[in-house]
Image (tube, rainbow, N blue to C red):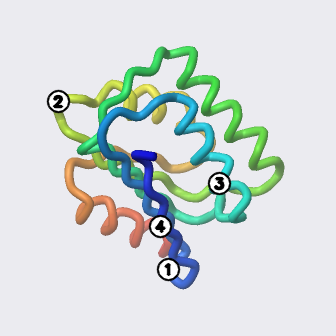
């Protein structure tokens, strides 16, 4: 599977790294794993810089809806996308679909994403 998940319970952080072609089914499986690990409220970094994916707007909105239903009454932690500047469409569409649910930002480096998440923890 081209999606790797690293959970740091001490830091309350989930880092998701995708490599190569990523199918929608793999994204759904990853979301289910995050729910099963009970870390929806953790901050998340999703590194898509080495991934290739093609999702329609409907698929993206379906993922956002699925996350909302999985979270129930629990809050979801801030989300930082790290992307290749030439391929911003998925991250922008997902950020737009979930902007009212939690803080979401898009970055071009993992360092900037980590800094932002650190600031989110302080607020």
In the image, 59 versus 28, the foreground residue is 28
Evaluate whether residue 123 shows in this view: no
**Earlier-in-chain disc, 1 versus 3:** 1
Q: Is residue 52 left or right of residue 40?
A: left
Residue at label 4?
6
- Residue 103 in the image, given as x and y percentages of width and height: 50, 50
**Earlier-in-chain disc, 2 versus 4:** 4
Q: Residue at x 44, y 26 (%)?
A: 93
- Residue 65 in the image, given as x and y percentages of width and height: 69, 30
Residue at label 1?
11
| Distance CA(mark 2)–CA(mark 4) | 26 Å
Look at the picture and state if 25 lies above or below 101: above
- Label 3 residue SS: helix
| Distance CA(mark 2)–CA(mark 1) | 31 Å
- Label 1 residue SS: loop
In the image, 91 versus 30, the foreground residue is 30
Tell me the tag on residue 33: 3
| Distance CA(mark 4)–CA(mark 1) | 11 Å
Residue at label 2?
86
- Label 4 residue SS: strand
Residue 87 is drawn in which quadrant?
top left
Evaluate whether residue 21 shows in this view: yes
Residue 113 is drawn in which quadrant?
bottom left
Look at the picture and state if 40 lies above or below 64: below
Q: Give the residue at the far right of this rendering.
A: 73
**Earlier-in-chain disc, 3 versus 4:** 4
> Which-is-in-front pick, marks 2 and 3?
3
């Amino acid at each position: 599977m081209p999606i790797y998940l690293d959970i740091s319970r001490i830091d309350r952080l989930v880092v998701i790294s995708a490599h190569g072609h990523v199918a929608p089914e793999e994204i759904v499986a990853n979301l289910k794993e995050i729910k099963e690990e009970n870390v929806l409220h953790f901050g998340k970094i999703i590194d898509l810089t080495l991934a290739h994916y093609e999702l329609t707007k409907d698929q993206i909105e379906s993922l956002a809806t699925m996350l909302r239903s999985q979270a129930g009454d629990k809050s979801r932690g801030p989300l930082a996308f790290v992307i290749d500047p030439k391929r911003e469409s998925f991250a922008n569409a997902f950020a737009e679909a979930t902007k009212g649910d939690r803080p979401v930002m898009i970055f071009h480096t993992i360092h900037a994403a980590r800094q932002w998440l650190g600031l989110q923890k302080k607020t």
